[in-house]
Structures are given as C-alpha cells and as structure tokens.
Image (cartoon, rainbow, N blue to C red):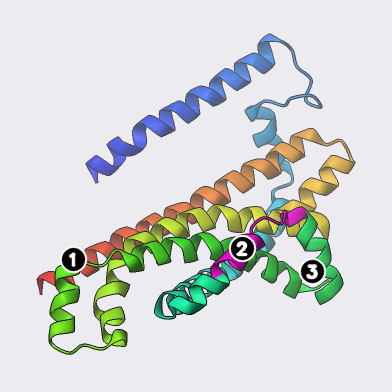
C-alpha cells in the first residue's frame, strides 16, 4: 500500500501545482470568468448545479460502460476470428483499418440517419471507436506465443483450438489490457460526440447547452467531469489487470 501511495504522489503533486498556477494566473491577471474561470470558480459552479450535473454524468457513465463492454467483446471476438482464420485476416484487416479513418463527427450523423435517434446509433459509434485498438492489441498478443510450448503442444497432438485456448489466449491477456486502456479513453470521447450531436441528456449535451449560453464556467465543469470519468475507467481497468495477472501467476504456479 505504501508503494502505491508513493507512486501516486508525483502525478498528484504535479496536478495540484498546475491547478495552483492556473488559479494564481486568473487572480494575477484578473481574468473574467467568461474568458477563463479558475478552479475555485469551476468547483463553486459545479457545487451549485450538482444535482443536474450528476444526472448528466450518470447518463454518460451508463452509455460509456455499456458501449465499452460491447466494444471490448467485439474486439476480442474479431481478433480471435482473424487469428484462427488467416485467410479472413488478410482480406478483412484492411477494411477494419478503413473504419478508423472516418471521423466520428462525420460518422455519427450517418448512423442517426440509418439507425434513428435512439440508443442504437450511440452504441454502434462507441463500439466502432473501441473495438479496433482492442482487436489490434489482441492480434499482436495472440501471435506472440512461446515457441517451446507451441512445439510441445503440437508434439502431443494438440489441435488448433486447444493451442489457442491453453497457450495463445492466456499469453495475449497483457496485450488485451493494453488495448482496453486505449479503448477506455475512446469510449468516453465517443459518448461525448454522440451526446453533442444528438441527445437530450449526458455531459456532451450539457456542454453543448452551456456553450450556446456562453456559460464558460459550466463548460469547464463538464470538461472536468469528462477527465474524471476517463481517469476512473482507466483506474478500474488497471485494477482488473493487476488482479487478472495475479490470478494468472497463481494458476501457473499451482
């Protein structure tokens, strides 16, 4: 526990220093809140509208978690299929790359036209932005198998599925978590874009309304919520990664 607290100390100290410098600059140059509010003003404004802000935060969190889970499952499934079917990989992988070259701000209006204005286009957008880094990371991990263990399994007559299940899949777990960390940030970004362009709730919708009313302090409050959500999702994945790695090492020893 002490080591964890010490490792968290430097980034927390840097963040606090930046906030102090920010607030000091606002006071020193007497900047008005509609130009650049300080952290004190942002916290005060967030506290004043907390019930409404909490409602929008909950809407964004639910959508991000659900979409991220679907995107992760899709990424793992796509990686497994492309790995087990090399012919499919050579044909489909370039198409997967192409899906990532379309800006989300362009793609989401098309999804609304095709799928309507409900929950479905939002989920599809989040899945599209999340699955690719997970699929790429998993594919890299699945190809990094131990050649000695592979030769041993082949020697005892293990089939392709058993090699995948017992050797390649466990070895790809660290790579999977690398992809999950990247996709976690993408999931929040995808939700914000979807809420900005077509929603009646959520932090993206809240920031859009605040922009239209030139309520800059509320815009910064919304941005702060986005940062906190991204850090929270990233932290959860880090905890899961440590637990999973510990469980895997214990299983290997036993």
Q: Is residue 14 above or below residue 43?
A: above
Residue ID at (83%, 36%): 215
Residue position marked by numbered label 2 in the rendering: 64
Name, please, the residue furthest toward the right.
213
Q: Residue at x 49, y 73 (%)?
A: 89
**What crowding class fits label 2: few (fewer than 14 Cα within 10 Å), some (14-19), or many (20 or more)?**
many
As helix, strand or loop, the secondary structure at mark 2 comes to helix
Front residue of this view, candidates 41 and 10: 10
Q: From which residue to which does the magenta span run?
A: 93-105
Q: Residue at x 69, y 29 (%)?
A: 41
Q: Is residue 102 magenta?
A: yes
| 124 lies left or right of 68 | right
User: SS for tag 1?
Assistant: helix
The CA distance from mark 3 to mark 1 is 43 Å
Identify the image quadrant of the C terminus.
bottom left
Residue 249 image label? 1
**Which SS class for mark 3?**
helix
């Amino acid at each position: 526990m002490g080591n964890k607290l010490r490792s968290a100390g430097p980034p927390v100290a840097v963040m606090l220093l930046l906030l102090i410098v920010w607030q000091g600059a606002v006071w020193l140059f007497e900047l008005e809140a509609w130009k650049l509010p300080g952290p004190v003003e942002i916290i005060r404004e967030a506290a004043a509208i907390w019930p409404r802000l909490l409602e929008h935060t909950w809407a964004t969190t639910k959508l991000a978690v659900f979409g991220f889970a679907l995107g992760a499952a899709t990424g793992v499934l796509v990686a497994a299929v492309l790995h087990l079917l090399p012919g499919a990989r050579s044909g489909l992988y370039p198409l997967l790359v192409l899906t990532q070259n379309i800006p989300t701000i362009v793609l989401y209006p098309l999804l609304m036209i095709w799928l309507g204005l409900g929950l479905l286009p939002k989920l599809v957008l989040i899945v599209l932005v999340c699955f690719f880094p997970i699929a790429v990371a998993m594919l890299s991990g699945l190809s990094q198998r131990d050649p000695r263990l592979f030769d041993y399994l082949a020697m005892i007559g293990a089939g392709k599925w058993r090699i995948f299940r017992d050797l390649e899949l466990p070895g790809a777990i660290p790579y999977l978590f690398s992809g999950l960390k990247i996709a976690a940030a993408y999931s929040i970004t995808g939700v914000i874009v979807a809420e900005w362009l077509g929603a009646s709730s959520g932090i993206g919708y809240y920031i859009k309304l605040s922009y239209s009313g030139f309520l800059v302090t509320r815009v910064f409050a919304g941005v702060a919520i986005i940062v906190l959500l991204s850090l929270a999702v990233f932290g959860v994945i880090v905890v899961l990664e440590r637990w999973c790695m510990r469980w895997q090492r214990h299983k290997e020893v036993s």
